[in-house]
Amino acid sequence: MDIATLKALKPAEYEEAADGYRATSDMASTARDTVENQISAGIRNQLEGETASAALRELKELGKNFHYVQTECALVSTALNGFAYDMAAAKRKLEAALADAEAAGCTVGADGSVTFPAGGTEVDGKVPEGGTVSPSTSLTDPTASAIEQQAVHQHPNPNFGKAIGFANRIGDALQEAADADAKWAPKLRALKADDDLVVSSRDWSDAKSDQDGVSQAGKKYLDSLPQPPRDGSPKDNAAWWSGLSDEERATWLSLRPDTVGKLDGLPSTVRDEANRVVFDETRARYQLELDSLPKPPVNEWTFIAANGWASKVHTDEWMDWYKQHGERYDHLTKSLHGMGKIQERFDKTGERDLPEAYLLGFSADDDGRAIIANGNPDTADHQAVYVPGTTSDLNSVEGNINRMVNLWDVAHAKSGGQSVSTITWLGYDAPDEVVKDARHDSYAYGGASEFNKFLDGLEASHSGDTPPHRTVIGHSYGSTLIGAAAQKGTLNADDVVFAGSPGVLVSGADEMDVPEGHVWNEEGGSDPVPELGRPFLGGDGTIIPSDPDFGAHQMATRSHGHGGYWDPGSKSLLNQALVVVGKGDDVELNPSYGTFGPPGSWDHVK
């Protein structure tokens, strides 16, 4: 790149183009929201039949297109801003070098050469003549740099050394501009879609590649922006986000959606936008990888004779396949299954007036993480945060999502017109097995701080004039985590509900960090978990929430087993919903034991 080209370049024009692409991204986002959460939701709520189903399929594809346009245009905007940032820096360096050269009496040629005037101490009655040096760059090789410095010191004209410095600065600026052009040109050329209207897994995989490419090229630009607080509190995160400009927010969302989506305290709409990108990109990447793996052999099983009996065993062919690909195949398959169930929840918005879903956290690593809200927590009058228990992971997330859908249905009906948001918080590593893992408290303590930060984040991001009423609900080992959270930090909640609790690591309701009389417990008939967990997870003296001495309100359930607390039409679901909407006085308590005490025969009444 030459001087004239760099001097004529106007970074502001690229910034204006970036603004245009960002505006297009915003329009695509609005259009997507209209399609998915208004038009499609309205059809689901009011229409049935083949025509309605066909329309929903077409609208779903249209929504995918808008989301892809939103994501790619945001990347184009960020790339243009990054290019403008790099070129502006190079241009400033050039202009500063030219100004300094002029002030020193030097003349810069069109090719970047620097002509310096005569000057210095007379030699043989003559002032050392001036001359011209060619544009160069600052030498990084120590030997070459030393030779250059020696030449400067030996030259009789001091203007020679100044000219060398100006030429180096000019060369550096031109080289920096050339490098920026070479770096950004392929990144910008890559930001284009194929010529069909189908957003495929390959398209989302390409979008992730585009994101990585722009992120790598734009490192200096991103580093120049205000950075998220290191280990910041939710309030710190909220303050950081509110202090960013629209351009800066768009940059963080386009280049670091995984970072933005994890930050407690940011608006739920922002976290949802970031995590939806991570979700779609991960789902596409996993599907492509799964498609590339050899499929398991059809003949998985065979029989062998052992002591006169036929035993069923895996075939040698299947075992060979599993040793090479089985673990990864299982992870991909289970993760994709869970992602499919999350997408199904997105696609149910509008059914029975079900509000739109917000993806407040997502990761497919290891067992997976997912935080899904029914309704916007930031505007809700009542929030309920549910922590699932042992064996909960991304693969099995459907049941936990459905429990909070069922709770939203009843709580919404009982809210008296106030808004409700129910949240499935699978934000921790739940025990994988009951016998081997669930008796240990390490899983609870391991997730306690993250849970407390999430609750504090709901407080920081809430936009209403009145603080929301917040209920935390723990099922099985999830109740243990809530107990650990109360021990290790401030439990930012108004009510606590335990269901099928094996123990919460504390000895009484007064240790749960909520107002007196706001701890509730449910134990369904024939639920074996509370007694099984008592020796391991109970408080001092192995006290669990079902014991009279614990001090929890014992709610009537009329449910059976360990998983029936959210069954539609159950007393346990109704009572939870009443607590969630702040109507604890209407809760039906177990009459066999008064206000406090363990569940009894009432639970077996049909």
Image (spheres, rainbow, N blue to C red):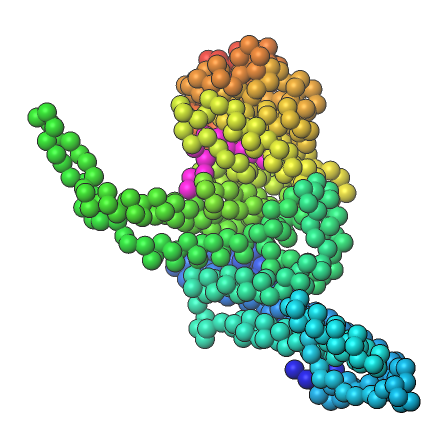
- Residue drawn at point x = 36 percent, y = 54 percent: 290
Q: Is residue 354 left or right of residue 200?
A: right
Q: Is residue 402 magenta?
A: no
- Residue drawn at point x = 46 percent, y = 73 percent: 194
The one nearer the camera, 569 or 562, is: 562
The one nearer the camera, 168 or 297, is: 168
The one nearer the camera, 173 or 568, is: 173
- Residue drawn at point x = 38 percent, y = 56 percent: 289
Q: Is residue 375 left or right of residue 107?
A: left
Q: Quadrant of the C terminus?
A: top left
Residue 563, picture quadrant: top left
**View extreme (front): residue:** 124
* Residue 212 percent location from the top left of the image: 54, 61
Establish if 227 lies above or below 235: below
- Magenta: main secondary structure equals loop
* Residue 408 percent location from the top left of the image: 56, 39
Establish if 48 lies above or below 192: above
* Residue 468 percent location from the top left of the image: 70, 37
Q: Quadrant of the N terminus?
A: bottom right
* Residue 590 percent location from the top left of the image: 54, 16
Residue 132, picture quadrant: bottom right
Q: Is residue 155 left or right of residue 347?
A: right
- Residue drawn at point x = 44 percent, y = 20 percent: 529
Image mark count: 0
Residues drawn in magenta? 384-396
